[in-house]
Structures are given as C-alpha cells and as structure tokens.
Amino acid sequence: MLSIKNLHASIDGKEILKGVNLEVKAGEIHAIMGPNGSGKSTLSAVLAGREDYEVTEGSVTFNEKDLLELLPEDRAREGVFLAFQYPVEIPGVSNVNFLKIALNEIRAYKGLEPMEAKDFLVRLKEKQKLVELDGKLASRSVNEGFSGGEKKRNEIFQMAMLEPKLSILDETDSGLDIDALRIVAGGVNKLKSKDNAIIVITHYQRLLDYIVPDVVHILYNGKIVKSGPKELALELEEKGYDFIKEQVGA
Amino acid sequence: MEAELKTMTTKDKLIAEFESSKNSLFDNIQLREQALEAFSKQGIPNRKSEEYKYVNIELSMKGDFAFSSSKKLSAKQIESTQFLKDAIIVVIENGKFNSESSKVNSLPKGLQILTISEAVSDESYTKHYTKYADINSDVFIALNTAFASGGVFIHLAKSAVIETPIHIIHISSVSENTILNTRNLIVVEENAQVQFVESYETVDLSAKSFTNTLTEIVVEANAIVSHFKIQNECELGSLISTTQVVQKGKSVFSNHTFTLSGSLVRNNLNIVLDGEHIESHLNGLYLTNGNQVVDNHTLVDHRKPNCNSNELYKGIIEDKSSATFNGKIYVRKDAQKTNAFQSNKNILLSDDGTINTKPQLEIYADDVKCSHGTSTGKLDVDKIFYLRARGLSEASAKKLLMHAFASEVLDSIKGMEDLHNYLEERISKRFE
C-alpha cells in the first residue's frame, strides 16, 4: 500500500529526514517511535503534503501512485488520513458541515454522487458512537473550545467518517488521560480492517498496549534505525532511547 | 452659460442648483438656507479632509449632475428588489417615495408612514426633524438638509409592537448622472418595538448615481429598535449613508450594516446614548472587491451612566479595493459605569488591497470598562491545510473559512430568518 524509499526532507534548508525507508501493507499496523526531534512529525507532515517541507530525495508510492506529486487534498481523496498532533480550531465552521463537504469532495473525486442526507446522518450517528463523541461536540465549530482529549477524539471521529485506507496517527496519545486513551484506541481498533493500514506515531509505548502494532520502527536522527515485533516497544520503554543511541553509535 | 458651467466647481454647482430651485421646490426655506451655508463653509471633502481622507469624494462628484430623475421602473423591476417574504414595503425610487409600489395601506395599529411633505404639519415630525443630525458636524448632513426631498416619516406610537419588519427600499435607476438627497425620520415612542430594513439597490442604472441619504432615528425610553442596512448597489452607484440615532433611557438599538457592493460607500453611523441603562449594538460586514471603496465611520457617544455598547465590524478585502473603519467612542464625564466594547477584524486577500483601521476612544469618566481591538491578516494557512488534509480543495477551504469569518456578524441577526437566509445566500455566492 505505502512504500517509502530513501526519503529525505528538509525545512528552511535544514535536513530532518535523512533517508527513511518503510513498507506498509494493507491490514497492518505500524508503530513509529522515536525521541523528540527524531523526525516523527516531519514524516507525517511530508506524507500529508505540508508545503513548508521540501523533499530533496527519495520517493513515496501509495497504491501505485506517486504520493509526493499529489496535492494535499488529492492525497486525502486517495485515502490518506492524518490525525493531527495539534488539531486546529476553526471557529464558525461546523464539524458536521465541514465533514459533509469533505466527504462529498472525496466522492466527487471518485466520480460518485454526493451522499444522500439520510445516509450521511446514519453514518454520523454510527461513528459518533464509535468514538463516544457527544452529539453536541459533533455539531459545534471544528475543535473550538474542545479540551485536548476532545480534539483527539474528534480526529478519530473524522477518520471514522472519511474511512481512509491509510491513517497516520501523529502522537494521538499525547495529552490524553487513560480513559480518553482507551476510548480513542478502542475507536481505532474498531476501524481497523484487512483493507486499511494504520501508522501510529508515538513517543511512548503506552498507546501500543491498546493499539497493538504488527511492526515497531524506531526513528532516530531522520532514519529508521531499527525495526522489530511489538516487543521492541517494550524494550524501548524499559531501556529508554539512550539504548538506541548506543546501538547506532550516536 | 454652458462654458461657465464647465468651469464651475461641484460646490458652486450645488449652490447654484439650490438658488434656482429653492422657491419652487422647497419648504422650510430658512432651515435649508442655514444648511446650505453650513455646506458652503465646509465644502466638498478632498484628500486633505481628515474625516474623508480615504474616500475620493471629489472624483465621485465630478462632472455634471441632475438632482432628480423622471425615470420610472416597472412594478416587476421594483419587485425584484424585495427579498423579505413578509414586510411593510416602502419604495423610494430615485429619491422619491413611490406610493404605487409601496405597501403601506392598512398599516398595523400605532404605525404611521407619511411622506416628508405630508408630515410637515405633524407635531412629532416638527419636534424631531433635523434636531439630531447637526449640519455643522458634517458636510453631507448639511447638503442633505439643504436639498432633502422625497423621503418618509415613520412614527410608532407608544407601546406599539410591530412584528412585521418595515423594509425601506432605496432604488437608483437614473439614466443621467444624478445626485439624490433622500431624508427619512423615524420616531419610535416609548416602549414600542420595531425592525427596519433599509436596502440600497440599483436597477437598470445607465449613468452614475450619487446618493446622499440621511436617516434620523429617535428611540424613546424602553423602546427596542433593530435597524438593518443592506447595501447592494452596482459599480455606477456611490452612496453616502448617514444614520443619526438618539436613544433614551433603557432603550435597545441595534444596527447591522452589510456592504456587499457599490463603487463608493461611506457610512456614518452616529449613536447618542442620552439616558441610563441603554444598550447599543453595532454590527458591520463589508466585502469589497474590484476597485471598490468602503468607509465605515461610527460614533458611539455615551452621555449618561450605566450604558452598554458593543461593536463588531468585519471585512474581507479583495483585489484593489479599499476599506476603512473608523470607530469613535466617547465616554463623557457623567457616563460612569459605562461598558463599551469595539472590535474590527479584517482579512486582506490580495497584495493590492488596502485596509485603514482606526479605533478612537475618548474617555472622560473614571469608572468604566472599555476595550477595543483590531486585527488584519490573511487567511490562516494552518486552517487551510487542515481542511485540505480532509479532502477539501484549496478553493473550497478558503470559501469555508471566509464564510466562517463572515458568519459571526451574520449570526448577530436574531429573529429575522428570511433576512438571514437572503444574506447567507448573497455572501455564499460572493465566495464562489
């Protein structure tokens, strides 16, 4: 589904990603862990198409398409979803209205008719329940006045509504208390299927107790320096990131 | 004579026009002569006039102008300007009350609508007419007072509650360049309630119209008045629109000004809070593009204690257009416990657009809460990216954000669903 080869990216002339390689297949959950400043958020931003980052080398293929050639909206329409680490507040734009527009633009891209209002409402209700999102929050302005936990839950709600093929969760666990974490993780697990894939970007192992990855990658200094089974996350938690630094000789 | 006219300044032409028509056309000559003198003293504003430095009035008034028009629109053309489902319609066509197209028969109890010429003998009219808009304070007040003709006097009796809104439609449709001076007086007696919509339209306009309109509104104690101005003129229309309001104790007045088009629009909204426990709301939205010039001047004059005023003006400026906001708040020495808030926010969409914003607070009382804020920026790139990351095109993301920005002002309209819907549709179309 996703194939990242030797990806280099920089911002303001400073190289952050220094040759990332990653293969993700449908039905898989990958975790990317790494210390602060290792390039985790840069990777998610580059995949989503943030224009501040410049890709200097390498390639990203998503379902046979050159992802880096696509506009951010076309990446979303092809099925890439980024759950933001810091979701933006948009006063005056209702969550529901914005999702309706998003959904219909995605459908138009695929040559489909706009969704029937009734079907939309059914989906809305169903997905709200999935992430235990209060109906009032769903109809309010996007993230305006939401708590940190509500914002993250709203990201997963949007993910549920848009049914992406590849979801990238960028530090979705940061700032979540344990109850909110369980709800968010529960939502993600319910959305998992053999046809979609999930990349979980996190600093801590905690989230991976709830969203169990098939593969764990350690991103360090702009490169994936180690990959392994889910136990790698536990080892990392136990020994700390210094053990990686020693291993890679940094 | 013709050669002479060409070398005359606009001011001279206006004075000559007054002299030639004063005996045949006008009532109330003494008052008008005083006003003309005040006009003559102040002159047509130019770029050096502090209060009009961002609007090129001289240019808009250049050339020869007529002062009335005999052109008549068809009933159908006039109907096209009506956007409220249920309203008491007052049509002012080229500066003159049009009785055929207006719907002022069988008015609700307590409501009276008269033409200015019918009203001259009315007690309430003579008590209030020209008492608030000071001819020495502004040249266009002076000009209007000298030339005023054809407007309406609207009176609400004590405790009258009119549920149907009154829609005053100003239509310009002239076929030669014309200056129109329209004057209205609205008196809302104690404890009465009413909603006014004043819209400014151009229909089949084939020459320049320069409309200098003045509405005086008297809001007596405990009265509740909502006043909406919808400015819809085409690129041949220039509009100076003055609203002079005086409020008495415990009254509530709200003005909502929506400037959606027009080549030059200058709004002067002056509110005097002459009583205690008064509430005033000023909401404005201006969407400018092309070479449009829009200038909103507001003045909130707190004269007595314990009053609240709240002001929100927002604008989106595109292309080479220019917008000005100048909001004055006076809090006089006696006006203790005043709450006065003002906010002006702008989105500048182009590099060639201009926004001038100037809040002016003058506070002479010491126990007050006043604040003002102003911001001007581009559309937030983080918000645009967030929406695009969910599948919205860049264009629809921007459209959604502009709509959201405007909706704060739009949503201040309460209880006028069809007006809200009409504006909603106009604004959405604008962002397409």
Image: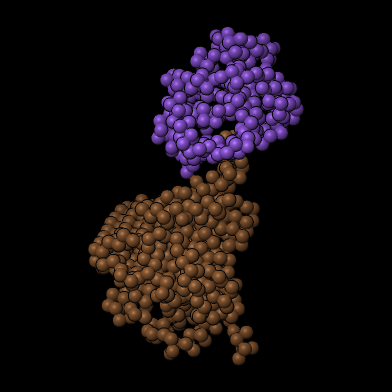
Q: Residue furthest bottom?
A: B1
Chain A: drawing colour: purple
Q: Quadrant of residue B327?
A: bottom left
Decide: is B156 above or below A47: below
In percent of the image, x 30 and y 70: which residue is there? B106
In percent of the image, x 53 and y 65: which residue is there? B233
Question: Left or right: B344 with respect to A77?
Answer: left
Q: What colour-coding does the image apply?
A: by chain
Chain coloured brown in the rendered structure: B
A14, B350: nearer the viewer: B350
Residue A191 seen anywhere in this rendered image of the structure: yes
Rendering coords of residue A235 (x, y %): 57, 8
Rendering coords of residue B150 (x, y %): 42, 77
Residue A143 seen anywhere in this rendered image of the structure: no
Rendering coords of residue B28 (x, y %): 37, 84
In percent of the image, x 33 and y 61: which residue is there? B164
Q: Residue furthest right?
A: A57
B256, B345: nearer the viewer: B256
Q: How many dots with numbers?
A: 0
Q: Specify the quadrant that holds the N terminus of chain B.
A: bottom right
In percent of the image, x 45 and y 63: which residue is there? B82
Q: Quadrant of residue B132?
A: bottom left
Question: Left or right: A214 with respect to B332?
Answer: right
Question: Left or right: A32 with respect to B240?
Answer: right
Rendering coords of residue A220 (x, y %): 65, 18
